Image: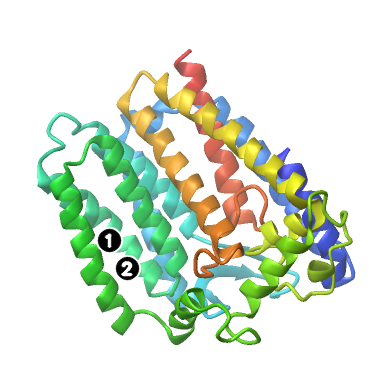
Amino acid sequence: MLLIIGILSIASISEARTGAFVIFKKQLIFAIIGLALLFLFIFIDYRFLRNYSAVVLALYFISIILLILLFVFGSRIRGATSWFRFGSLSGGLGFEPVEITKFALIALLAKYFSSRHIDFGLIRHIFISGFYVFIPTLLILLQPDLGSATLIIAIWVGMMLISGIRIRHLLIILMIFSILAGIGWGFFLKDYQKARILTFLAPTKDPLGQGYNVNQSIIAIGSGGFWGKGLGHGSQSQLNFLPEQHTDFIFATIAEEWGFFGISSILILWGIIFWRLFITAMGATTNFARLFIFGFMILLLAHISINIGMNMGFFPVTGIPLPLLSYGGSNLITMLATFGIIQNIKINNS
């Protein structure tokens, strides 16, 4: 149902953006590929990830290599070198390696923490796991892609909390993050990223400049009312006042056209998915399976919270897509394939 809502919303704005349903057709193809992988992974025993460390490490190192190759062969889009492009910018296809990196890290951390749950209180495991996270995080920050780097760190911290990190160790990590944040502001963040954060703190300071996107998003959300303006009748999205209405600001587009009823339905559907994921995780017979599912839940929750938050002005604009709803093949296909693996966990634990 979430896929259908997303595809219909993308179809409604595809005509306004391009004069043809190019974006809609691409998203439909991405959905078909993702669903095919979902059903494929249902019938592939997930235990190959649990039992063979070489497979998980291979996925991790492949993702690292792809992130490095971005600096040589990647295309620079909206200030970040995060994509491999195939074909023209408007009609071609793109691939974002960070989506594979998220999956690889969830599998790697689930493998690492599950095999060391007895002595996880030892601080060395935090630093070892942190080293695995540090390498891709640094490469992602150099693109620069602050949003994806934030998601990577959220996965790590969240999985450590679930694994039983000690409070004093958590406080040490928070202190380290505070120091790194100060260093990052001075040496890593680009001017436009700093402007986004400053705009988040004072959104009305530059309403026609850096604050334009968020202000238009808030207008779109508020104008939808309870039932919405109807599919294809959103003034902010259809007249292109709202930028990136099919990717970063798909939530605002849905809110304008589907109204409070539509976004409430979306949140209810996500609630059902999270409930089923939680039930499956708690019923898992191995620590690896449980941690893998919880890691995926953390990723989903971070994606949803950050995207909706930046649409409503609660968080800075970071380019994080709304899972199953935003346009884009890399995220959609990876998410659906992971759902297939989790369904296989459910089957093998029943």
Q: Are marks 1 and 2 in contact (CB under 8 Å)?
A: yes
Q: Is residue 67 visible?
A: yes
The circle on residue 322 is none
Question: Residues under labels 1 and 2: Cα distance?
Answer: 6 Å
Within-10-Å neighbours for mark 2: few <14, some 14–19, many 20+: some
Describe residue 295's horizontal placement relative to residue 244 as left or right.
left
The residue that mark 1 highlights is: 134
Q: Is residue 327 visible?
A: no
Q: Secondary structure at mark 1?
A: helix
Within-10-Å neighbours for mark 1: few <14, some 14–19, many 20+: some
Q: Which residue: 55% across, 85% down?
A: 205
Q: Secondary structure at mark 2?
A: helix
Q: Position of residue 329 (x, y in %)?
A: 64, 55
Describe residue 328's horizontal placement relative to residue 100 as left or right.
right
Q: Quadrant of residue 187?
A: bottom left
The circle on residue 138 is 2
Q: Nearer the viewer, residue 112 or 150?
A: 150
Q: Which residue: 16% across, 53% down?
A: 127
Q: Which residue: 25% across, 64% down?
A: 177
Q: Residue furthest top?
A: 350
Q: Position of residue 94 (x, y in %)?
A: 62, 65
Q: Nearer the viewer, residue 248 or 263?
A: 263
Q: Is residue 128 above or below residue 183?
A: above
Q: Quadrant of the N terminus?
A: top right
Q: Quadrant of residue 189?
A: bottom left
Q: Which residue: 36% across, 18% down?
A: 285
Badge 2 amino acid: Leu
